[in-house]
């Protein structure tokens, strides 16, 4: 299974322990949160090598168990730009996954999210043999909604109180793609 992707401007692949410096620098280079969905800066203690190694190990375990595939996004100079994940993989009669993504805020608005997420969705269908990929987006998250629309994801409706965020249950709008939407045929 090939989990490495090269797009016009990006290298996309699972993180390894060797990426510690790039990961730390990307977190240190973040500006203060630009909206409610942007993450808070990590503290110096969170950015240590031991914690990073534990993080990499757990990403490896969920990948081997076919549960979650997390992909780091790099530019050609090796700068880490963000992360795209296919989570909660469900096999059997579902063959689906839940999409997650973030781009470090100094790089917003330059099409990197679109390029990376489109590539990971394609990999999900072609390499991971998924049939359906869904994203749940809070109605106020304009940037994420714009991204889903620009990826031609289809709006399916609102899932009520579906996500525990900042100490409360929030509604999410479901956007989905099936492999057929990309012109691919699914064979069980
Ligand atoms: C959501 C996120 C990944 C989007 O990143 P981004 O850098 O803005 O995305 P892109 O530059 O690739 O833009 C994607 C599309 O959205 C459009 N867009 C971006 N910001 C916009 C805005 N504020 N208003 C309207 N459209 C916008 C772009 O024009 C592009 O559409 P196009 O290709 O049709 O022109 C980024 O804001 C982020 O990391 N947010 C924090 C984490 C998060 O919210 N994750 C999603 C949780 S559901």
Image (cartoon, grey):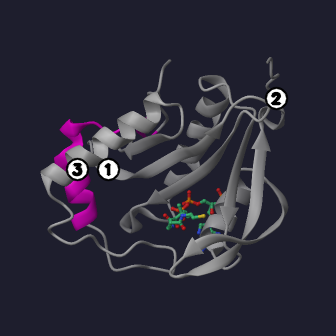
Q: Is residue 97 depicted above or below 188 in this figure? A: below
Q: Residues within 10 Å of mark 2 (few under 14, many from 20)?
A: few
What's drawn in magenta, residue-wise? 9-28
Main SS of the magenta segment? helix
Q: Residue at x 62, y 33 (%)?
A: 124
Ligand 1 sits in quadrant: bottom right
Which element is circle 3 on?
helix
Which of labels 3 and 1 is toward the front?
Answer: 3
Q: Is residue 76 depicted above or below 26 in this figure? A: above
Of the image marks 3 and 1, the number of the one nearer the N terminus: 3
How far is the residue under mark 1 from the one under mark 2? 31 Å
Specify whether tag 2 is near ligand 1 (CB below 8 Å). Answer: no
Question: In the visual, does 12 lie left or right of 150?
Answer: left
Query: Picture coordinates of residue 63 (x, y %)?
Result: 45, 33
Q: Residues within 10 Å of mark 3 (few under 14, many from 20)?
A: some
| Cβ–Cβ under 8 Å for marks 3 and 1 | no
Question: Which is nearer the eye, 123 or 97?
Answer: 97
Which label is found at residue 52?
Answer: 3
Q: Which residue is mark 2?
A: 183
Q: Quadrant of the C terminus?
A: top right
Q: Which residue is mark 1?
A: 80
Residue 78 shown in magenta: no
């Amino acid at each position: 299974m090939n989990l490495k992707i090269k797009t016009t401007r990006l290298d996309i692949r699972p993180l390894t322990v060797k990426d510690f410096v790039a990961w730390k620098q990307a977190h240190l280079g973040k500006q203060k949160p630009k909206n409610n969905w942007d993450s808070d800066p990590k503290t110096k203690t969170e950015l240590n090598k031991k914690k990073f190694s534990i993080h990499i190990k757990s990403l490896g375990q969920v990948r081997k168990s076919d549960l979650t595939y997390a992909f780091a996004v790099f530019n050609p100079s090796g700068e880490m730009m963000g992360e795209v994940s296919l989570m909660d993989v469900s096999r059997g009669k579902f063959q689906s996954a839940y999409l997650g993504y973030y781009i470090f805020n100094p790089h917003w608005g330059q099409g990197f999210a679109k390029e990376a997420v489109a590539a990971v969705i394609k990999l999900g269908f072609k390499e991971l043999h998924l049939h359906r990929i869904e994203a749940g987006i809070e109605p106020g998250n304009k940037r994420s909604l714009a991204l889903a629309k620009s990826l031609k994801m289809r709006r399916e409706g609102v899932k009520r109180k579906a996500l525990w965020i900042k100490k409360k249950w929030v509604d999410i709008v479901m956007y989905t793609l099936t492999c057929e939407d990309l012109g691919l045929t699914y064979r069980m």
